Amino acid sequence: MRKITEIIIHCTDNRYDSKIALDDLRRDHIRRGFRDIGYHFVVFYDGTIRAGRPLAEVGAHCKIDGHNKHSIGIAYVGGRRKDQVNEDTRSLAQKNSLKKLIVELLQQFPTINTIVGHCDYDPGKKCPCFNARAEYSPLLIR
C-alpha cells in the first residue's frame, strides 16, 4: 500500500441537484484521458458515499506538485447553483457523510497530516467552493 499523508477535497463542478452517477463521472474522466475515475470517493447529494479509484492506486485529482502520489481524493457532487455560479452546495447529508468518511480515513491511515481543498494547491480553481482546510483540519487532532 502507498503511504497516504493527505486528503484533498473536491467538488464535481455540477449543479447541486445533478443526477450524475459514478459511472457518468468515470466516463467523463476516461474521455478526458484518465485511465479511470480520478477520485477515490464520491459523496452524492443524499449522502451516499461511493468508492471510485481503489485506495491502493494513485489518484488523478490534483496534478499540482505531485500531490496525487500521497493523497486520497474525495469529491462531493455539486459546486454550482442553478444559475451556474460556484458555491458550496453541500447538503446536510453530504456534510455529515464527508465528515464521517474523513474520520474513518484518519483512523485507517494515521499517517494523514493534511486535509485541504483542491483550491489550496491550485488557486485558479474554485473547487471545492468552501474552506476545507478550516473545516476539517481540527479532525487531525487525535
Image (cartoon, rainbow, N blue to C red):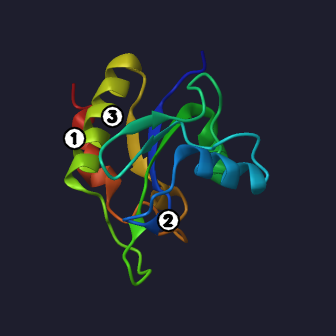
Say few, some or many: other residues with alpha carbon within 10 Å of mark 2 (under 14 / 14 to 19 / 20 or more). Answer: many
Amino acid under disc 1: Pro
Q: Is residue 77 left or right of residue 31?
A: left
Label 3 vs label 2: CA separation?
A: 21 Å
Of pointers 3 and 2, the one earlier in the residue sequence:
2
Between the C-alphas of marks 3 and 1, the distance is 11 Å
Give the image location of residue 109, x and y in percent. Answer: 41, 20
Q: Which label sits on residue 13? A: 2
Rendered residue at 79%/52% (across/down): 33
Label placed on residue 138: 1
Label 1 SS? helix
Q: Nearer the viewer, mark 3 or mark 1?
A: 3
Q: Which residue is mark 3?
A: 102
Secondary element under disc 2, as helix, strand or loop, is loop
Q: Is residue 22 above or below residue 55?
A: below
Q: Position of residue 119 (x, y in %)?
A: 47, 61
